[in-house]
Structures are given as C-alpha cells and as structure tokens.
Image (cartoon, rainbow, N blue to C red):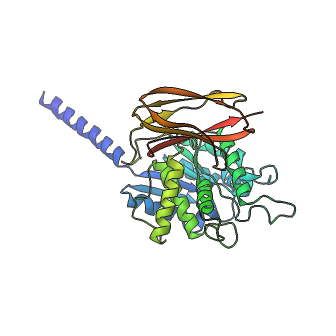
Amino acid sequence: MKKYFIFLFLLTLSINNIYAKKSSEPCKVLFIGSSYFNFNDLPGLFEGLVISSGREIYIDQWIPVGHYLDQHASNSAIKDLINSNDWDFVVLQGVGSLVAYPEYYTAHPVYPALLKFYDMIKANCESTKMVFCMPWAYEDGMTWMAGWTDTYEDMQIHIFNNTIEYLENIDFVIAPVGWAWYKVLKEKDYPLHYLHLSDWNHPSKRGSYLMACVIYSTLFQEASYELNYNGDLSNEDATNFQTVASNTVLDSLDLWNITPSNIYQGSSMLPKKFQIHQNYPNPFNSSTIIPFSITKPGFVSLKVYDILGREIYNFINEYRRSDSYSIKINRNNLISGIYLYKMQLENESSEIRKMVLLK
C-alpha cells in the first residue's frame, strides 16, 4: 500500500510538472518575408514589444532581401524550418503591388503561395495560426507608371479588397499593417517619407515600428499602448502608433479573422458587453438583416461606412436595454461594393464586420 501511494505521488508530481512546463512555454513565432521584414529588424522590434509585456517569446526568421512569397513557398529549406517546431504563429509578409494588381504582376502570384503555405503549416502543426501581413501601397501609388493614375489611396484600397477576398477561401489571420499605415498617413495628410523611405516603397523606422505594433495586437489580441518600449522613436510617435495599431486590430477582430484566445491574450481583454453578428444574406442585393445582442444596457450606435472609412448611414444612436435585436438595411442609393458596419456601446467597446452589396 505504501508503494502504491508513493507511485501516485510521483505520478501526480510528473503530471503537474508537465502542465507547469506547458503553461510556461514561450510563444513561438516564425517570420517569413524579405526586405520589408529585414529593414529595421522588424522581428527585433516585435520582440521588444513582447518582452516589455512580460511574456516569454521564441522567434525565428527567414527574411532574405529580394525574395517573394511564392519563392519561399517552394523552398525546401523553409519547409524544413516550418517543420522544425510546433509554431504558435507563422507570420508572412506580402508585397503591395502583387496583392493590389495580381492580373498585372503575374510573375510572383500571392494567392497560390498562401495556399501552399497553409497546407505546409497545417501539415506540420494543426494548431499553428498562419498570419498574413496586409501590405501597404507605394507612397506615390502607381502614378510612376506610364498611363497609370492610381494614387496611394487607390492602391491601398485594392490591397485591402484583395486581402479580404483571399480570406474567403484560405483560413488565415490578417495583420492589418497596410490599413494602419493608411489611417496614420490619412490623419497626417499624407506626409512624404514618414512611414516610407525615400524609395517610396520600403518602411522607415516609424513604418516598421507601426508594423510591429499591429502584429503584436494581432497575435495577442491586446493593446500595445501601455507597453514601455518605443523602438528608439519619440514617445509621441510611439504612443500614436501603438494607439492606431491597437484600435485598427481590436475594433475589427472578425474582419481580420482573429479568434480571441485565452492562451496568449493579456489582461486588457474585457468581457463583451454586446455581440454583433454577421449580416444575412451576405452578399446581398436589395436588403439584409444585422442581428445583435446587448448584455449591458447603454447608449448604442450602429453605423455603416464605405471602404474609405466615410460614414454612409447612422442607423442607431440611442439607449438600448439588454436584449437581442435585429435591424434591416435596404440598398437605397448604395452602389455595389464592400461596406463595413460598426457597433459601439457607450464610447467604449466597438466591433466591425464586413458586408458585400452586389448588383
């Protein structure tokens, strides 16, 4: 009997050690990209944010200059690197021109590369999240090309639309880097060489830091604006980029296909005070229904925006009790395209979803 209890004690101790080891394991992140990750040491900037949050992190990378995603997807050395660990996240870097204009830039297609990476990553470890960084547009758009008139803003909209379209068929997570860049540049009235280098393309130190903040909030579903790491930027710049990145990601988790997780998220994740559901039908033609529920009564707003972030309609702007609701949206004068609807409660919690209007 004494031997039996000793055996049980040792077994219990062994199990506890296993769980303790599992809970203390660092978050494992693999970065795969090229010069956009390589310039300014993007993985190092991300690591600085993570360390300042008190987390343990293990990072590996494959970011040689001058290579494209399709070349990486066919590289056996990268496959071996993916198979070398049970990664929590594999973060992929895209190129703005290839995502914005896949019909024109056909030499290095992005969509097939994402499919290859998805299969490769899931074959190694089913729980690994594949994260695709939405690229940013060239600082002068495509106006440098003879006969092209697309501005920075036009190009960024193409990048946004195609990234969302890729998501329809591939289950990856979007780190909305280009969208956060767009918000910063639009707010500052598009200053030259602020997030871009003087080549109108690669990221400045500011641009890389903003990218790191977006990736941080995407992976951990946590705001970065309380972290004591500014990547050698001014406190003003760092705080602004942290805020924009956090809001861009956390206000639109569903849009970016981010599923909240209690594994790596921080204490800033608060219980939801409401839930807004996907509209149905979606896509729609003449009308659609948006269901939502409120668990804490308060002043609620429900607004619809176009793809440029301009407010189109303000459907709800009033106090609501805790209950389940739905609202019908008619096409009216809306043109075909992608729209965003945003619900906000008491100027605190907010959530954004995407709907598509067809002819």
x and y percent of residue 303 in the render? 58, 40
| 56 lies left or right of 359 | left
x and y percent of residue 163 in the render? 67, 46
Name the residue furthest right: 147
Q: Quadrant of residue 261?
A: top left
Q: Please, is residue 102 above or below residue 65 in the view?
A: above
What quarter of the picture does the N terminus occupy? top left
Name the residue furthest left: 2
Depth check: give the residue in front, 338 or 132: 338
Residue at x 64% of width, y 68% of height: 196
| 194 lies left or right of 154 | left
x and y percent of residue 271 in the render? 39, 39
x and y percent of residue 112 in the render? 71, 45
Depth check: give the residue in front, 73 or 346: 346
Depth check: give the residue in front, 355 or 37: 355
Whether residue 165 can be seen here: yes
Whether residue 63 can be seen here: no
